[in-house]
Structure formats: structure tokens, C-alpha cells
């Protein structure tokens, strides 16, 4: 079953520029920054910079998805690299987490800004 993420296009947030792997030791940073956001808003996370993901990274995405849904919001990812998308497909999470709606409408973060902040309206 494929989920419809048409309502999950704002805010679209980017993984910080210096995070290229969502692996053990890095996943807590993502959780710390994004949990408060997904409690308040539906979020689409742009993962174009993530080149590698492991079980800890997958667990963090599942956790964010659960927190969002417990709060009545949606959580999806866009622009996953081919390797990350393949891994999510292998574990059966591609249908739940990957959205193709709004995949190219990312608002870039200003230089030095926190990329987890929502873009201004």
C-alpha cells in the first residue's frame, strides 16, 4: 500500500550540510533537532545529502515517524539517494517514509543557519 503525502509538503527541512551519513553516533543529533519539530508540524525531510544509512539511522527515521503520528502529523522523506532508497525498500519502509511529492521544492538554508528551522512564509 502506497501512502499519499500530498499534505506533507510544508515545511520541507534539509538535513544539515555537514551530515552525510545517518549512522550510529550521528542519529541522536537528528532526533534531538527534529523531534520537537515533528511534534508541532507535518514535516518532509530532504535527504539528498545522506549517502549512507545503517540500522541506527533507520531507527531514527522510524522514531520521527512515530512521534509525528502520535502528535497527529505526517513525516516523510524526499530526495533519498539511490542507495538509501534501496535500503529503505529492502526493509519495507520505502512505502511508508518516501514521498515523491514536492521533492524538488526545497528552500535552501542560508549560510550558517540551522537547517532544521522552518522556512519563512
Image: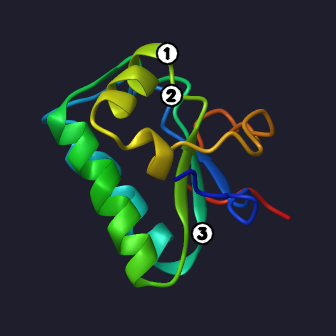
Q: Is residue 14 left or right of residue 69?
A: right
Snapshot quadrant of residue 11: bottom right
Q: Position of residue 27 (x, y in %)?
A: 24, 43
Q: CA distance from mark 1 to mark 3?
A: 24 Å
Q: Residue at x 67, y 58 (%)?
A: 5
Residue 17 disc label: 2
Q: Residue furthest right?
A: 121
Q: Position of residue 18 (x, y in %)?
A: 42, 25
Q: Earlier in the sequence, mark 1 or mark 3?
A: 3
Depth check: give the residue in front, 101 or 49. Answer: 101
Check disc 1 and report its element: helix, strand or loop: helix
Q: Are marks 2 and 1 in contact (CB under 8 Å)?
A: no
Q: Earlier in the sequence, mark 3 or mark 2?
A: 2
Q: Residue at x 50, y 28 (%)?
A: 17
Q: Up-down: is 106 above or below 12?
A: above
Depth check: give the residue in front, 15 or 55. Answer: 55
Residue bearing mark 1: 82
Residue bearing mark 3: 42
Amino acid at each position: 500500500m502506497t501512502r499519499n503525502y500530498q499534505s506533507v509538503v510544508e515545511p520541507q527541512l534539509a538535513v544539515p550540510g555537514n551530515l552525510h551519513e545517518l549512522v550510529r553516533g550521528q542519529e541522536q543529533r537528528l532526533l534531538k533537532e527534529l523531534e520537537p519539530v515533528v511534534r508541532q508540524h507535518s514535516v518532509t525531510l530532504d535527504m539528498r545529502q545522506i549517502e549512507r544509512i545503517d540500522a541506527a539511522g533507520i531507527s531514527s527515521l522510524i522514531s520521527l515517524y512515530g512521534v509525528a503520528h502520535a502528535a497527529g502529523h505526517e513525516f516523510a522523506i524526499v530526495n533519498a539517494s539511490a542507495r538509501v532508497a534501496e535500503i529503505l525498500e529492502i526493509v519495507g519502509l520505502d512505502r511508508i517514509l518516501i514521498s515523491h511529492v514536492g521533492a524538488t521544492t526545497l528552500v535552501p538554508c542560508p549560510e550558517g543557519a540551522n537547517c532544521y528551522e522552518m522556512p519563512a512564509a
